[in-house]
Each structure stands twice: as C-alpha cells, then as structure tokens.
Amino acid sequence: MTKLLRRPAATVALGLAIGLAGCSGGDDDEGGDGSRDVPADSVAVVGDRQISRDAFDDRLAAVRRSQSGSAGLSGQQLRQQAMTTLLQEAWLEREAEELGATVSDAEVRRRVGQARAQFPRRRAYRRFLGGQTERDLMFQIRVQLLGEAIEAKLREQGKSRRDVFRRLQTRWSGETACRDELKVPGCEG
C-alpha cells in the first residue's frame, strides 16, 4: 500500500478510542425504535451534530466496495464498520474544531493527487482503489489528516498520543448517541 495511506499510530489509537469509549445519550426517546436522542432521519448524534441516514448509506456502500473481491463480511459486520467509521470522523471533526486544528479540502485533494501520481497508468490506480471510488479515498485521507492535525495540536500543548486517546474518550463518549439497530461495541445510546 502506498505511504500516503499508512495510518499513523495516532489515527489507529483514535479509532480504538471510539470503539472502547462507548456512546451514550440522554433519556429522551426521539428515534421511535428505542434510540435515545437520535432523530428519525439520523443514525447517530455527536453533540449537536447529526449523522444522517444518507451519510450512513454512503459509508456502507463504500465499505461494501472496499470489501469487493475479498472474503466477505456479514451484513451486520459491514454496518458496524460503516458506523464506526462515521463516528470516528464525527469525533475527529468535533475535536479538531475545539482545538482549532484544520484540514482543508485543498490539502485532501493534494494528497489524493499525490496518491494518483504514484500510479502512472489509470488501470494501476483503479487497482489501487480496489473497487473504491476516489470519493472513498478522499474520505479516508480526510480522516487520516484530521487525526494528524489533532495530534500535532496536542503535541504543541506538550501532550502525548495517549493524551489524544484519553481526551477523545472523556470528551465525546458522553455526547454520542446511536440508533439501536446500528450499535457498535461501546455505543449503547
């Protein structure tokens, strides 16, 4: 795999933080299916931000594309992977905002261009994508860059990768609620 897409340890740790930290919400039942604090047209809420059903459907399609040609995951596993990825992005987005860490669309496009440039033939680039779209790649790169930007901001404050993990656990787990049918490990809201 290309160097551009190797996930740094901090990004992996951030992903683990989501899986381990848990999701909880308030006591209101707005989802109609027992989900707390999740409006009917959403699959999850992180703070005051909703993750829409459309965003979930898009990410689920991307997960399915990424699995094409490999030993298949079950439908439930695909849904869990899609949900975990969306929560990871939402937590990273919120954390980046709080820290004043930014990732521009131009930086994401530049990184995608660098990835594309590593494959002089279109066919090789398509093979690299492995069934995914360039939009899927942009999403992955954006999440990676958010993790890197957050880590850099916290390093400026003298904090370690472990601090990033703890900060995500304590800051966002209490502000996240998920639809019952899309629970991921630790997401009980």
Image: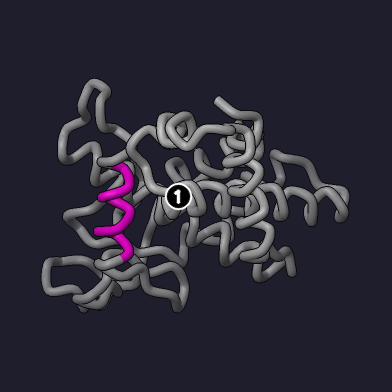
| Position of residue 54 measured from the top left corner of the image (x, y, whole percent) | 27, 67
Q: Is residue 165 left or right of residue 71?
A: right
**Rendering colour mode:** one colour
In what element is the residue under mark 1? helix
Q: Residue at x 21, y 66 (%)?
A: 35
Name the foreground residue: 112 vs 160.
112
Q: Is residue 156 left or right of residue 106?
A: right
* Residue corresponding to mark 1: 134
Q: Residue furthest left?
A: 33
Residue 145 image point, x, y percent: 65, 51
Per the image, is 48 magenta?
no
Q: What amino acid is labelled 1 in the image?
A: Glu
Q: Nearer the viewer, residue 107 or 159?
A: 107
Magenta extent: 55-63
Q: Is residue 59 magenta?
A: yes
Q: In the figure, 31 relative to 105: above or below?
A: below
The secondary structure making up most of the magenta span is helix
Number of marks in the rendered image: 1
Vertically, is 144 above or below 46?
above
**Residue 166 visible in the displayed image:** no
Q: Quadrant of the C terminus?
A: bottom left
CA neighbours of label 1 inside 10 A, class few (<14), some (14 to 19), many (20+): some
Q: Quadrant of the N terminus?
A: top right
Q: Quadrant of residue 104?
A: bottom right
Q: Position of residue 61 (x, y in %)?
A: 26, 50
Single out the residue that lies furthest toward the front: 121
Residue in view at x 66 percent, y 39 percent: 10
Identify the residue at horizontal 20%, vertical 58% (top origin): 180
Residue name at image x 32 percent, y 64 percent: 55
Q: Where does the image place residue 58, in percent across and percent down from the top left?
A: 30, 58
